[in-house]
Image (spheres, grey):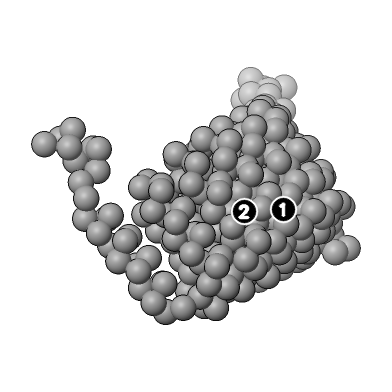
Amino acid sequence: MSMVNQDVEGLDKFIPEFVQLVDDLDLDDDASDEEEEEARDETGKLAYLSKCEELGLTPVSQVLKYLEQDDMHISHYGIGVRGATALAEALKVNPNITNLRLKDNKLGGDGCQIVCEALIKSNHVKEMDLSENCLGNNNGLLTRDSLARLLSTKLCSISTLILKSNKLADADMVVLANALGDNRLLTYLDVSMNNFGEKAGVAVGNMLQTATRIRELNIGWNKLRAKGVHAVADGIKSNGLVEVMNLGWNGCGDEGFVAVGEALSVNGSLVEVVLSCNGAGTRGAIGLAEGMRQNESLASVDVDQNILNEEGGEALKQALSDNKGIVALNMENTNTSEKLRELIATMLHDRLQLPTKQDMNNA
């Protein structure tokens, strides 16, 4: 056999091996490119789009827009559970979003769980609004357990939590309150417009006696009644951090007002108290006024839409006169006289014209 034929036979053996080697290199390059692309997905857009494609969803342009910002406002979009699943993939890797607003998106318990699990793996979100997402009723068990796990994890950095209008019940609040008792970061909690009753009030009262760092609590528009509000007031007595407390529209009556008055007489942190539309009368107003008179931190009280009567109104006016630190007292839509309300308005107007301690220090 000639030398030429031998060389050709050698090439025949070599070429397939060479082609395979090139193909392997191409595959390695493709895999490397994909890995680099994933590594560059700093906003989570690629993760979101990939999951949308997998689930057969049309990507929401607002989600893509806000993934590049620190505030994500995706309210009233009805993204549902599948949309939350896609969003969660982005949240797991996105380091920018600190404010997550998902109001009215039909998340339900499953959607809430998916979002919470994503946030457990990320500690960037500080404010979260899950209002109007049907988290209660049949979804309550899944919702409360998911939120409790999130709020209990050491990586959780949420300081503001809004769960307004979700039909949450007593059992839900009991679990959340237990989790919040050990939470050191949450400072703002809005659980208004739910279905909380007396047991929820007791749970919140117990929570306020723990190491919770909550400074603003809105539990208005529920059904705490006298016993529930009394329990919250008892919790306030030993709490030195809560500054704003909304207990309006809870049907607590005179007993609730008296309990809040007793709490005010010993609490040194409350700045604003809302007790509007609670069915309180003269006895409640007098009891509340006694606490207002003694509290040195209090600046604003709202007793709008209560049946205070003139005697109750006079007691509140006297408390206002004795406590010069109070600069706002809302008694509109009560059965007190217009003359009395005008006198109170004049007192407050004159008071607001006076220089504050800070003004005098800066002079």
Q: State the mark number for residue 229.
A: 1
Q: Is residue 288 visible?
A: yes
Residue at 25% of width from left, 59% of height from top? 350
**Res. 150 in view:** no
Q: Which of 190/8 is in front?
A: 190
Return the x and y of residue 11 as percentages of the image width and height: 65, 28
Identified at 35% across, 69% down, the residue is 343
The one of 199 and 165 positioned closer to us in this rendering:
199
Screen quadrant of the N terminus: top right
| 170, above or below 98, in the image | below
Say which label, 2 or 1, has the lower sequence index: 1
Gap between marks 2 and 1 measured at Cα: 14 Å
For image coordinates 53% across by 72% down, the residue present is 310
Amino acid of disc 1: Val
Residue 249 lies, in percent from the top left, at: 66, 67
Circle 1 SS class: helix
Question: Viewer-nearest of labels 2 and 1?
Answer: 2
Which element is circle 2 on?
A: helix
Q: Position of residue 77 (x, y in %)?
A: 60, 71
Q: Which residue is mark 2?
A: 287
* In the image: residue 310, left or right of residue 16: left
Residue lying furthest front in this view? 311
- Circle number at residue 258: none
In the image, is residue 61 above or below residue 84? below
